[in-house]
Image (cartoon, coloured by chain):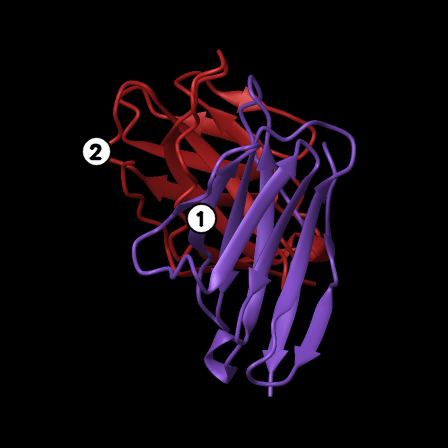
């Protein structure tokens, strides 16, 4: 699986959009971009994933560059409860019954949302 | 999203004893379950992958005779830490995935302290 690079930490004001970048310059054509987050002392929580199109769900938006070498996770209106470590992971994921690639966690970005 | 539970949420045991941790998928059938370990201020490290009815596949450096994994049904996997030592103290997290589903769902984690 391709490696990712994320900033170690970021701050965001409550109510503002949090934009978390991720570089994955060696991503392969069949690898998806996944985002998870881990609130202190809890298990990771799935946020969103995408292949090449931008994606949006009730939690966040995922913007993937056209060359797929980087992406940005956007939390549109950050709250204090969004304070967590955010992990960007790329892996093969086949939903056709084929085996899924393992999730390999890097160090992630520690997002602190401040009042 | 799907719910994965772990039991116990925390456990303290004496050195030399064995501890069993359960991971259950509550509302879906998990064809694959994963076990991770996380030391303080570090990222999650994959220990092993198990498919229902098959032997687990362990990551390099993980002792299969020390960390016994059983995935006997589509809703239950267990991790037994045998002859535990203080250095086994860690946060153990399981995740579950189902064929045809792109994301893994994580349990809340089990905090193991070996005294």
Q: Is residue A54 left or right of residue B24?
A: left
Q: Element type at marker 2?
A: loop
Question: Can you give x and y, in whole percent of width and height, for residue A59 in the image?
Answer: 66, 35
Give the number of the disc on residue A34: none
Labels 1 and 2 in the same subunit: no
Viewer-closest of B14 and A3: B14
Chain letter of the purple region: B
Residue found farthest to the top: A96
Question: Can you give x and y, in whole percent of width and height, for residue B23 in the image?
Answer: 68, 48
User: Which of the image's four quarters has the C terminus of chain B?
Assistant: bottom right
User: Which of the image's four quarters has the N terminus of chain B?
Assistant: top right
Q: Kindly identify the residue that appears in the image at 37 percent across and 59 percent down.
A: B62
Q: Is residue B76 left or right of residue A54?
A: right
Q: Which residue is mark 2?
A: A26
Q: Is residue A92 placed above or below B18 in the rendered structure?
A: above
Question: Can you give x and y, in whole percent of width and height, for residue A34 in the image?
Answer: 47, 34
Q: Is residue B13 placed above or below B36 in the rendered structure?
A: below
Q: Label 1: chain?
A: B
Q: Quadrant of residue A66?
A: top left
**Which color has been applied to chain A in this rendered view?**
red
Question: Can you give x and y, in whole percent of width and height, for residue B24 in the image?
Answer: 72, 43
Residue found farthest to the right: B27
Q: CA distance from mark 1 to mark 2?
A: 25 Å
Q: Which residue is mark 1?
A: B48
Q: Kindly identify the residue that appears in the image at 38 percent across and 61 percent down.
A: B63
Q: Is residue B88 placed above or below B26 in the rendered structure?
A: below
Residue found farthest to the bottom: B115
Q: Judge depth for marks 1 and 2 and give the one in front.
A: 1
Q: Element type at marker 1?
A: strand
């Amino acid at each position: 699986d391709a490696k990712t690079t994320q900033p170690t930490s970021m701050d965001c004001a409550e109510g503002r959009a949090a934009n978390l970048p991720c570089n994955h310059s060696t991503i392969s054509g069949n690898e998806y971009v996944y985002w998870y987050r881990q609130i202190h002392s809890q298990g990771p929580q799935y946020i969103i994933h995408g292949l090449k199109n931008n994606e949006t769900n009730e939690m966040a938006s995922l913007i993937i560059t056209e060359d797929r070498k980087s992406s940005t996770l956007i939390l549109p209106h950050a709250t204090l409860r969004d304070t967590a470590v955010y992990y960007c992971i790329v892996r093969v994921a086949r939903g056709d019954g084929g085996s899924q690639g393992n999730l390999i966690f890097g160090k992630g970005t520690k997002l602190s949302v401040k009042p | 999203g799907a719910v994965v539970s772990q039991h116990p949420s925390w456990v303290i045991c004496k050195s030399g004893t064995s501890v069993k941790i359960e991971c259950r998928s509550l509302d879906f059938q998990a064809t694959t379950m994963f076990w991770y370990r996380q030391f303080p201020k570090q990222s999650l490290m994959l220990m092993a992958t198990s498919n229902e009815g098959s032997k687990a596949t362990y990551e390099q450096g993980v002792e299969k005779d020390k960390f016994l994994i059983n995935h006997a049904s589509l809703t239950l996997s267990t991790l037994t830490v045998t002859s535990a030592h203080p250095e086994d103290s860690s946060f153990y997290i399981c995740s579950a995935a189902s064929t045809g589903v792109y994301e893994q769902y994580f349990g809340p984690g089990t905090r193991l302290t070996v005294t």
